[in-house]
Image (cartoon, rainbow, N blue to C red):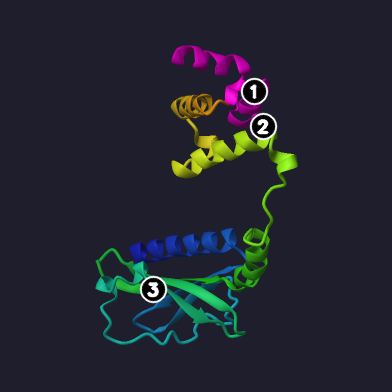
């Protein structure tokens, strides 16, 4: 039994180290021993806690049925940084919860970037496109149409199927896009299609 416990714990420790390494330096992973009520493992320790520190867990809690792993909660780090956390009860081979794994994500850096990103992405104060520049801008009109199609159907360019591309070409034709001399070249560049493929699509639609 002890051998199985050590094997399971070593697996949890390996997972904890991998998570911390993948998201370094923004993630700390802590494993608490519920019975002893102290920390038995910590990786990426920006909270300045150490193995052996008290866990401050409530005695008598039904950790297995609490649904704790479905709750993301906020904490404040020792230095004031904002932390998002989730705690996962670790069920042993006897069906009981012996440890609690807590994953703490430092979101302070991303929070500090939010006002900057909001300002960069905000287009509410921008002037309309200058008509003299865009009235005959075929590239812009086709790009706008295609990306509106992608947004309507929750798609991205890299995941378009042949059927999606066919539908886009059909809609562009119905809008008169192919009345313009260079439309096939612009559409081909955007959809990663050759001019021959585009004209084959059009022939099949006739």
Q: Secondary structure at mark 2?
A: helix
Disc nearest the viewer among 2 and 3:
2
> Where residue 196 appears, x then y in whole percent?
60, 14
Label 1 vs label 2: CA separation? Answer: 8 Å
Q: Which residue is mark 1?
A: 180
Q: Residue furthest right?
A: 132
Cα distance between the residues tagged 2 and 3 = 59 Å
Q: Are marks 1 and 2 in contact (CB under 8 Å)?
A: yes
Taking the magenta stretch, the answer to whether it contains residue 194 is yes
The answer to if 171 sits in the magenta stretch is no
Is 172 rendered above or below residue 10? above
Numbered label attached to residue 138: 2
Q: Which residues are magenta?
A: 177-206
Q: Which mark is residue 83?
A: none
Q: Which residue is mark 3?
A: 100
Magenta stretch, overall SS: helix
């Amino acid at each position: 039994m002890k051998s199985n416990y050590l094997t399971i714990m070593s697996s949890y420790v390996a997972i904890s180290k991998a998570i911390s390494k993948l998201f370094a330096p923004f993630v700390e992973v802590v494993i608490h021993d519920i019975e002893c009520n102290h920390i038995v493992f910590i990786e990426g320790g920006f909270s300045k806690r150490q193995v052996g520190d008290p866990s401050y867990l409530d005695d008598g809690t039904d950790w297995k049925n609490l649904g704790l792993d479905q709750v993301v909660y906020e904490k404040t780090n020792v230095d004031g940084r904002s932390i998002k956390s989730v705690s996962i009860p670790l069920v042993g081979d006897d069906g009981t919860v012996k440890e609690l794994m807590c994953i703490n994500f430092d979101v302070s850096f991303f929070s500090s970037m939010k006002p900057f990103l909001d300002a960069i992405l905000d287009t509410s104060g921008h002037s309309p496109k200058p008509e003299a520049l865009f009235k005959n801008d075929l590239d812009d009109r086709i790009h706008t149409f295609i990306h509106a199609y992608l947004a309507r159907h929750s798609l991205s360019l890299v995941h378009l199927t042949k059927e999606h591309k066919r539908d886009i070409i059909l809609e562009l034709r119905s809008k008169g896009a192919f009345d313009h001399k260079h439309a096939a070249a612009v559409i081909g560049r955007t959809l990663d299609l050759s001019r021959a493929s585009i004209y084959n699509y059009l022939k099949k639609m006739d």
